[in-house]
Amino acid sequence: MKKLISVIGACLLALSSMAQTSTMKVSDTQNNPTYCAMLMDGKMILTAEGKQVYASVKLANGTIVRTDCTVVKTDKTKVHLKNGDCVDQDGNIILAEKK
């Protein structure tokens, strides 16, 4: 009887952990990274998926994201990202939440 209860408990635990997994495909995040500005060692760096970016990136719409966290839009306007600000693949700037 104790073994049966243990097996049922283990099955329930396994099923509950499977229910909490994300449904987002890994390929979706790899094909559409979001570029974010992050303050590291007193210097602003550009990151994508938590890793530092060492070269400027040109998005599909022509927007350029530089490694110094400057975004050059297609109309040649420049925006400097602040700590926590991000740019999606469409060139939309997502401002960090103010705390």
Image: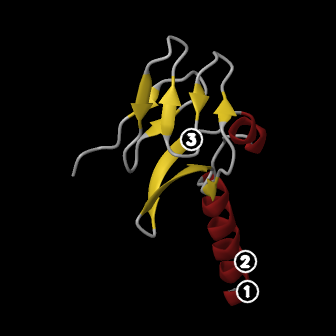
Tag of residue 42: none
Spatial separation of the CA atoms under disc 3 and disc 1 = 51 Å
Residue at horizontal 50 percent and vertical 31 percent from the top: 71
Instruction: Say which residue appears at 63% left-offset and 15% top-offset.
Output: 61
**Residue type of the residue flagged with mark 2:** Val
Per the image, the residue denoted by label 1 is 3
Q: Position of residue 76 (x, y in %)?
A: 50, 16
37 lies above or below 91: below
**Residue 89 drawn at (x, y percent):** 61, 27
Quadrant showing the N terminus: bottom right
Residue 82 quadrant: top left
Where does the image place residue 11, in percent across and percent down from the top left?
70, 68
- How busy is the neighbourhood of tag 1: few (under 14 within 10 Å), some, or many (20 plus)? few
Task: Identify the residue at image location x=59%, y=22%.
Answer: 63
**2 or 55, which is in the foreground?**
55
Residue on which the image places disc 2? 7
Q: Secondary structure at mark 1?
A: helix
Which of the two discs, 2 and 3, sits closer to the camera? 3
Going by the picture, which residue comes out furthest to the left? 99
First along the sequence among labels 2 and 3: 2
Q: Nearer the viewer, residue 28 or 13?
A: 28
Mark 3 residue element: strand
Q: Which residue is mark 3?
A: 35
Q: In terms of sequence position, does the residue under pointer 3 or pointer 1 come before the other?
A: 1
Q: Is disc 1 in contact with disc 2, using a CB cutoff of under 8 Å?
A: yes
Name the one closer to the observer, 46 or 51: 46
Left or right relative to 22: residue 93: left
In the image, residue 85 sits, relative to residue 92, either above or below, namely: below
Q: Position of residue 90 (x, y in %)?
A: 58, 21
